[in-house]
Image: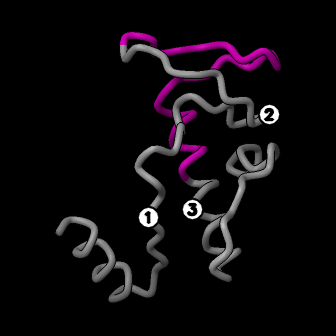
Amino acid sequence: MFTRLLEEKATRYGRDFVKVDRWFPASQTCSVCGRVDGPKPLSVREWSCSCGVVHDRDLNAARNILAAGRAERRNACGETVSLPAWAGSMTR
């Protein structure tokens, strides 16, 4: 019901609504290089990627979700969308 209300509100205000897959590993994926680092306990609030970037867990997840939503909106042809490694750098 919550997503339905969000969709209706987005339509009313002329905004796009994109639902990202529930199991998308947003907090596990480096928003700079795209490497999936794997599951971490919720007590881990910061983590370092092998590319050298130190991520805040929530900020990194937000960047990945934004990139996933943008990729879905740009590729609305019905095909499966894979995020490119550079997609996270577009949000900065």
Bin the neighbour count of mark 1 within 10 Å (Cα to Cα): few under 14, some 14-19, many 20 and up: few
Q: Classify mark 2: helix, strand or loop.
A: loop
Tell me what residue is drawn at x 17 percent, y 69 percent: 1
Residue 47 in which image quadrant = top right
**Which of the pair 1/48 is nearer the observer?**
1
Q: Is residue 60 magenta?
A: yes
User: Relative to 9, does residue 1 appear above or below in the rendering?
Assistant: above
Residue 77 found in image quarter = bottom right
Crowdedness of circle 2 by 10 Å Cα count: few (<14), some, many (20+)? some
Residue 55 pos. (x, y %): 61, 22
Q: Earlier in the sequence, mark 1 or mark 2?
A: 1
Say if 6 sits above or below 28 in the image: below
Which kind of residue does numbered mark 2 sit on?
A: Cys
In the image, 79: left or right of 41?
A: right
CB atoms of marks 1 and 2 within 8 Å: no
User: Magenta segment, which residues?
Assistant: 43-65
The numbered mark, 3 or 2, whose residue comes first in the sequence reads 2
Q: Which residue is mark 2?
A: 33
Q: Amino acid at mark 3?
A: Gly
Which residue was labeled with disc 1? 19
In-image side of 77 versus 57 (left or right): right
Q: Which badge, 1 or 3, comes first in the chain's sequence?
A: 1
- Name the residue tied to disc 3: 69
**Can you say whether 85 is above or below 11 in the image?**
above
Alpha carbons under labels 3 and 2: distance apart: 18 Å
Q: Nearer the viewer, residue 72 or 66?
A: 72
Residue 52, percent across and down? 80, 15
Q: Secondary structure at mark 3?
A: helix
- Give, as a three-letter code, the residue at label 1: Lys
Using the image as rendered, state which of residue 13 and residue 45 is in the foreground: 45
